[in-house]
């Protein structure tokens, strides 16, 4: 009798070894999946609760899922599944819809959504009407997979939903970090003061593109001699708002700039090009720092800048016209 039991035990053990050896080939063929890929987006295996009243499905899918680096817990009925959900934490639920006894897969899905709101919840169903399920049902289920379904489709669906949840988790963490460490909001005037060198460089580059300075050689210092004071006036205008279009602020820098350009021998259109280049340089500086600003104040600020640059242009033209004429170079 003891010898017979020993022989039976050895046969049983051998049978289990053969099953394990064949699991990656035979079972993969049964479920139409070659288990060679890994999840690829997490070092820790995702914990998955597999619920089905068919033991062969539990055994087969468990092998395939574990081959794809999932940590699988199986339950053969609703009661067992609810006990696991109440006592453990899971990343994924994969449950059959129809099971004998009290309850079904939707009860399991609802319990999982309540206990683990961020868990991916998938239901397997042979009922086509479930695909057209009501919104109330879909609140507890991420996706309903129609039977028969290939294991490769199940794996792809799980990985897709986990990737989406990972992205949402990353976004939530970023929002939480921002709430804990909010960035200080900068005034536009602060940005313009800090970005003066960049604004000057952008203005010079824009003027170089137009070739407006090409007719008469000037050093960089001569080209931008009046720019610092004109920037001061723009910052002053933003700090002390004025009505749009009334040109209430007198700009000595603009008058002097217009007169200077006439003495240097430039024609008046160069003043227009300079004003356009200045406006572009200012807007670029703001755009590069827009994430640090109070966006609610931005439209009014941009309008004020455009209005002030236009007022400076008009006063530069006045200074140009009032300056003693010089003989222009012949074309």
Image (cartoon, grey):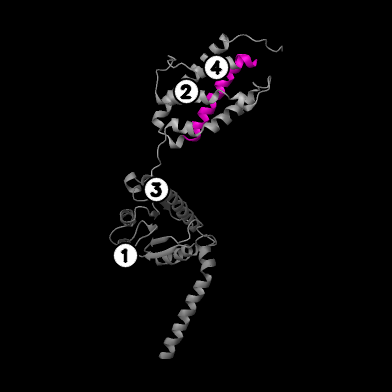
Q: Are marks 1 and 3 in contact (CB under 8 Å)?
A: no
Q: CA distance from mark 2 to mark 1?
A: 76 Å
Q: Secondary structure at mark 2?
A: helix
Q: Secondary structure at mark 3?
A: helix
Tell me, for residue 41, which label it has, or none: none
Residue for badge 2: 233
- Point out the image quarter for the N terminus: bottom left
Mark found first going from the N terminus, 2 or 3: 3
- 6 left or right of 211 in image: left
Q: Residues within 10 Å of mark 4 (few under 14, many from 20)?
A: some
**What residue is shown at x 59% (from left), y 20% (from top)?**
273
Q: Is residue 5 above or below residue 289?
A: below
Tell me, for residue 80, which label it has, or none: 1
Q: Are marks 4 and 3 in contact (CB under 8 Å)?
A: no
Question: Residue 187: within the magenta?
Answer: no
Q: CA distance from mark 4 to mark 1?
A: 87 Å
Q: CA distance from mark 1 to mark 3?
A: 39 Å
Q: Are marks 2 and 4 in contact (CB under 8 Å)?
A: no
Residue for badge 3: 177
Q: CA distance from mark 2 to mark 4?
A: 14 Å
> From the viewer's perspective, is the residue at label 4 or at label 3 nearer?
4
Residue 224: where, in percent of width, then height?
Answer: 58, 25
> From the viewer's perspective, is the residue at label 2 or at label 3 nearer?
2
Question: Residue 282: within the magenta?
Answer: yes
Q: Secondary structure at mark 1?
A: helix
Q: Are marks 2 and 1 in contact (CB under 8 Å)?
A: no
Residue for badge 4: 256
Viewer-nearest residue: 133 or 291: 291
Mark found first going from the N terminus, 4 or 3: 3
Q: CA distance from mark 4 to mark 3?
A: 51 Å
- Point out the image quarter for the C terminus: top right
Magenta segment: 261-289
């Amino acid at each position: 009798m003891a010898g017979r039991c020993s022989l039976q035990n050895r046969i049983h053990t051998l049978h289990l070894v053969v099953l394990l050896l064949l699991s990656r080939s035979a079972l993969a063929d049964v479920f139409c999946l070659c288990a060679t890929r890994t999840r690829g987006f997490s070092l820790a295996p995702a914990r998955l609760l597999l619920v089905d009243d068919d033991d062969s499905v539990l055994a087969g899918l468990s092998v395939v899922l574990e081959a794809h680096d999932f940590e699988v817990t199986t339950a053969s009925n609703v009661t067992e599944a609810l006990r696991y959900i109440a006592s453990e934490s899971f990343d994924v639920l994969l449950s059959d819809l129809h099971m004998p006894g009290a309850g079904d897969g939707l009860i399991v899905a609802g319990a999982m959504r309540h206990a683990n709101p961020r868990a991916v919840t998938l239901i397997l169903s042979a009922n086509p009407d479930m695909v057209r399920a009501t919104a109330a049902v879909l609140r507890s289920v991420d996706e309903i997979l129609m039977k028969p379904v290939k294991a490769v489709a199940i794996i792809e669906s799980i990985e897709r939903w986990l990737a989406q949840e990972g992205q949402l988790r990353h976004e939530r963490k970023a929002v939480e970090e921002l709430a804990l460490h909010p960035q200080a909001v900068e005034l536009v005037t602060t940005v313009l003061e800090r970005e003066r060198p960049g604004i000057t460089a952008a203005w010079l580059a824009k003027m170089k593109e137009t070739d407006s300075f090409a007719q008469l050689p000037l050093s960089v210092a001569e080209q931008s001699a009046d720019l610092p004071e004109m920037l001061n006036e723009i910052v002053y205008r933003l700090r002390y708002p004025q009505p749009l279009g009334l040109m209430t602020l007198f700009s000595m820098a603009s008058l002097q700039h217009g007169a200077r350009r006439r003495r240097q021998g430039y024609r008046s259109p160069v003043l227009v090009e300079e004003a356009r280049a200045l406006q572009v340089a200012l807007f670029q500086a703001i755009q590069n720092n827009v994430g640090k600003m109070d966006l609610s104040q931005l439209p009014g600020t941009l309008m004020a800048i455009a209005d002030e640059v236009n007022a400076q242009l008009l006063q530069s033209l006045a200074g140009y016209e009032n300056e003693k004429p010089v003989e222009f170079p012949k074309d």
